[in-house]
Structures are given as C-alpha cells and as structure tokens.
Image (spheres, rainbow, N blue to C red):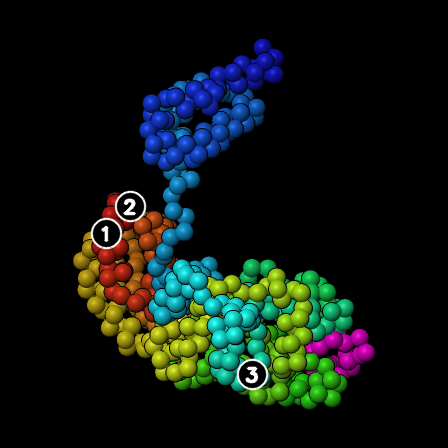
Amino acid sequence: MKKSETVKSYLSLIPPVHKILNFPEVQKLIDQYGQLVVVSSIRSILADYRNTIKCETRINNEIFSVEEIIKLLKKNINLQTQDSLIPILNLSGIILHSNFGRALLPKLALKKIEKVLGSSYNIEYDVDTGKRRDREYHIESKLCHLLGAEAVTIVNNNAAAVMLVLNTLARRKEVIISRGELIEIGGSFRLPDIMKSSNCILKEIGTTNRTNLSDYEDAVKPKTGLIFKAYWSNFTINGYTKSVDEKDLVSLSKKTNLPFVIDLGSGTAIDLRKIGLKFEPTPYEKLKLGVDLVTFSGDKLMGGPQCGIIAGRADLINKINKNAMKRAMRCDKFTIAALYSILKIYQDPKKAIKEIPTLRFLDRTKVDIKEQAERIYSKIEPFFRHKMKVKIINCFSQIGSGTLPNLSIPSVGICFQQNTKKNNGLFPMKFAKKLRKLPTPVIGRINDGAFVLDLRCLEKDIDLIKPLQSLKLDEDF
Ligand SMILES: *Cc1c(COP(=O)(O)O)cnc(C)c1O
C-alpha cells in the first residue's frame, strides 16, 4: 500500500466524536465534569491521533480501542480540571521569592481586599461632593507622609514605574547612566531595553567598575533629558570600584536643571537597622538628599501588594500623571485596597514589624527559630530515624527578589541526609521531589549533598509536622 493510503486507512479507524460521546463510560464523565470539558478533551485526543498517524511509521491498532480512548480521556480531563494554582510551604530560606509571589499580605489587608472587591466602594468617588475623585486619593497622603515625599503616584509594578518616568521626563532625549548600572533583573527587565521601549536614548558613561563625576558632567548636553541611577539589586561588584556620591549628582542636577531619578528596586518604608539588618537606603533619605524622584516595588521589602511606587517632586509627578501611558498602567482596586491597609499599618512602625509578614520573618531571631526547630525535630525525627539522618543545623536566609544581595541572615533549619550510599548522591533531589509531590508542596533547598528546610518563614509548627509525618518513605529511602 502507498503511504498516503496507509494514512487514510488508519485515519478511518478513528471513531468520530459523537460516537465516543455515546459510550456509557463517557456519559458518566459528562455528568461529572460537564459536556464542554469532555468534548474538548476528546477533540484534543483525536487531534493527537491524527498527528501520530501522519508522523509515525508504525501504528499499534490497540490505540483505537474504546478502553484506550477512555483511559486517555480520563487523563486529559484530569489535567484540565485539576487545580493549577496551589499553596506551597516556602522553606527555601528566600523570604521574597519571585516565583512564589514575593511578599505575603497581612491578614488586615486580606480582609480589606475581600470587602472592597465584594461590594461597591468609593474607589473613585467623593461621597461629600458626589463627584469623581482620583483613586489614588486613598493612598496619597499616607504614602507621602511615610516617604517624606511632596507627591507620589503608583502603577502596576516598578518596571512600569521606571518606564513611565523615563517616557514622561526624557522622551527622545538622552538618559545618562553609569555603565556599572545597566542592570538586568529577572523576568526580562533589562535597562537598555526599558530605555528603548520608553523612547529614550541611553547615554552610558564611565566603565563597569568605575564612574567619576566628570563622566556625568561631560555627558550633559542640550539633548540630555535626565540623570538616572539604578541600584544593584541582585548582584555586587567588588574590588577596584568607584561610584559618584549621590550628593554630587544632586548638585549637578540642580546646576543643569535636569531631574535626577533613582530606581531603588526595593524600597523600605522603615529603617531596617531597627530590626538588626544592614542598612538599606530608604526612599525617605534619598528624597531628603534632594533626589528628584525615586521608584521602587511595593511587593519587595515594603511587604505590600505588587505595584510600582514613584515618589518625589510634585511638578514631576504631575507631568507623569498627565502621560497617556499612566492610564494604561494604573493600579486596580485590589492594589489600592491592599496598599491602603499596609499604609495604615505603617502608621505605627512597631505594629508594622509584627503584622507585615515580610518584616515579621526578617525580625525573627535565631534563638526563636532554633526553639521551633527543636520542637519540630522531636515530633518528626522518629518517623525518619530508620530511613535517613535528620538534624538541626545553622543556615542562612536571604531576602530575595533582588534585595540586599550580599546579606545572609543567620537562621536555623532541619537537614535531611541519606543514611547509606543507596541513592548515589541523588538523595537530596529525590527527597526534594517527594516533598514537592505533597498536596501542599514543601519547598526547601539542596545544600552540600543534603536537603535543608529553613524555618524562618514557617508560621505554625503543624504546617510542617503534619506533611512530614504523612510521607510514605518507600525502600528508595
Ligand atoms: C525589582 C527591581 C525592578 C523591577 O521591579 P518589579 O516591581 O518587579 O517590576 C526594577 N529595578 C530594580 C533595581 C529592581 O530591584
């Protein structure tokens, strides 16, 4: 038989959709999952069949049996209907993990969001006058106060904030930036590309490791739009380095009448020295120094919802708000409600450290985490004793999401190591996979041939004890 005829004859063996729908077993699936899901699953399976017939040389006739089709159908429906958005237990030691959604919102914010989203609210409405009012009204004065800023505005994230600032203040003009600050952070935020998309001309100066004030001064031309600085949020350069004092850049910007903007990446609303951490410059201090605008993310150290905050000179913020791009980047009411609650909490900084999860995790002492580790260890060690070595270890947490990349925060973890050489060094990977398969996956990290759960972000002992006790450790371990 010719190839095309073979294909044709195999294609004729594929049962039509309406026939499959009449199988009693399929009727049951329709009752359970609905016609739409079942039909689309059948279609996708039959499309796969056609592909296989066209591409493969040998076809097993068994694939056309009712049993085989129903088996595939169940598998496909399962994939279509299972929950893809599920909670995980982040014991990776990275407090703000971009893959896990960065900052966790405090309970108060969650309650507010639920209320604001479930009923009509005065989002953009002044009940006194009965007129429209800007949605940022709810966050404006609190945020200004917290940051010591003349004016603020918010957009969907910090990438948007940077684009909006550049596009508003330096469209078709040159933006002066040191070569050492042409950063890329995760999720394809690359400053040269952001500049291009914002319709700005990148004017790079200095070298990767050293930039002088004279480099800035020489670069100022009539076509210059602004002076820009980006913080190294996810790397460091050590050794023979030099950057220009921000005070000098403030003077230069005043002298040349060019705005000076800093992308801080992660802004902290409170001084982190209060919770024993290395100093991270606050937006407050930068603005006090005379920087015209700062931008930063709401869901990094601030511990709030995803958003980009722009703070500084009122005349510049005014211009930004008039840019048509602003409307395309404006925050939704989820964000307004969440940020509003966060800002209310920040009105009392002591309360903020207790109630905002990001700050609470950062504030935990090693002693506190160690006590927790001991409690958990005593409950779980008997379950693992005959299979692997379990011990309490000292480890280091990191802030994550490109925040203070050099900072390791002393913490305590539970470490799992293999007893024998059975797994050829694959033990930590296998154990990590086993924990990822739990209904609420537990995420740790692999360190020196062992698997470690850093307890810094564990709020309740039971959240870890229960899943660990439920593990069925087969003979692989
Ligand atoms: C994180 C970060 C950004 C991007 O912020 P998103 O809120 O993720 O858009 C931009 N610049 C710097 C320096 C950052 O650290």
- Foreground label between 3 and 2: 3
Instruction: Single out the mark in the foreground, 2 or 1.
Output: 1
Near-viewer residue (381 or 70):
70
Q: Is residue 256 visible?
A: yes
Q: Position of residue 12 (x, y in %)?
A: 52, 16
Name the amino acid type tagged 2: Asp
Q: Nearer the viewer, residue 409 or 83?
A: 83
Give the CA separation, mark 3 to mark 2: 59 Å
Task: Identify the residue under disc 3.
Answer: 149
Q: Amino acid at mark 3?
A: Ala
Say which element carries label 3. Answer: loop
Answer few, some or many: residues within 10 Å of disc 3's Cα (few below 14, many 20 plus, some between 14 and 19): many
Classify mark 2: helix, strand or loop.
Answer: loop
Q: In which quadrant will I find the N terminus?
A: top right
Residue 80: image x %, image y %?
42, 40
> Which mark is first along the chain, 2 or 3?
3
Residue 416, position in %: x, y? Answer: 30, 59
Q: Looking at the image, is 240 positioned above or below residue 87?
A: below
- From the viewer's perspective, is the residue at label 3 or at label 1 nearer? 3
Residue found at the far top of this picture: 1
Task: Quote the CA–CA distance across marks 2 and 1.
Answer: 16 Å
Range covered by the magenta-colored residues: 211-227
Q: Which residue is mark 2?
A: 476
Q: Is residue 215 magenta?
A: yes
From the top left corner, tell me how far across and down residue 96 is, in percent. Answer: 44, 67
Instruction: Quadrant for residue 459, please give it.
Output: bottom left
Label 1 sits on residue: 470
